[in-house]
Amino acid sequence: MEETSQIARALAALGHETRLSIYRLLVRAGHDGLNVGEIRSLVAIPMSTLTHHLSHLVDAGLVVQERRGREVINRADFETMRRTLSFLTDECCTGVSLSKSDAA
């Protein structure tokens, strides 16, 4: 049940167009990640809005942040991404059997 809750948080965080764009950008950046200024210049949103959206992604476990002096490096958490995608696809095409009580 804990895993389902974590997956639901991740999917909810990605359910916003701006957060989805930020996340996809970080996935493209790979393990090097991007600092906040780089993300802001590529996504072209105000810093306060970016901070808000990054916070949601961090809280959902999709993004990890590392402080390097004055910089904050943001990286996609690829393990969380893999778990989320696996959750959605693990039972693909295995069939579904319903009983009459399931239909009620």
Image: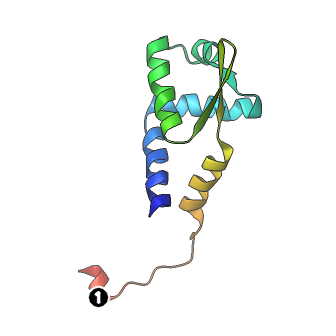
Q: Residue at x 66, y 11 (%)?
A: 70
Which of the two residues, 38 or 69, is positioned nearer the viewer here? 69
Q: How many marks?
A: 1
Q: Position of residue 69 (x, y in %)?
A: 69, 14
Q: Quadrant of the C terminus?
A: bottom left
Horizontally, is 69 left or right of 93 in the view? right
- 82 relative to 77, above or below: below
The residue under label 1 is which amino acid type? Answer: Lys
Looking at the image, which is closer to me, 73 or 98?
73
User: Does 72 sit above or below residue 12?
Assistant: above
* Residue 97 occupies quadrant: bottom left
Horizontal side of 82 relative to 56 (left or right) equals right
Q: Identify the image quadrant of the N terminus.
A: bottom left
The location of residue 81, given as percent across then percent down, is 62, 47
- Tell which residue pokes out farthest to the front in this image: 69
Identify the residue at horizontal 61%, vertical 19% (top origin). Answer: 39
Where's residue 100, x and y in %? 29, 88
Q: Which residue lies under the disc numbered 1?
A: 100
Q: Residue at x 49, y 53 (%)?
A: 7
Q: Is residue 82 left or right of residue 17?
A: right
Q: Is residue 62 above or below residue 4?
A: above
The front one of 41 and 59 is: 59
- Mark 1, secondary structure of its residue: helix
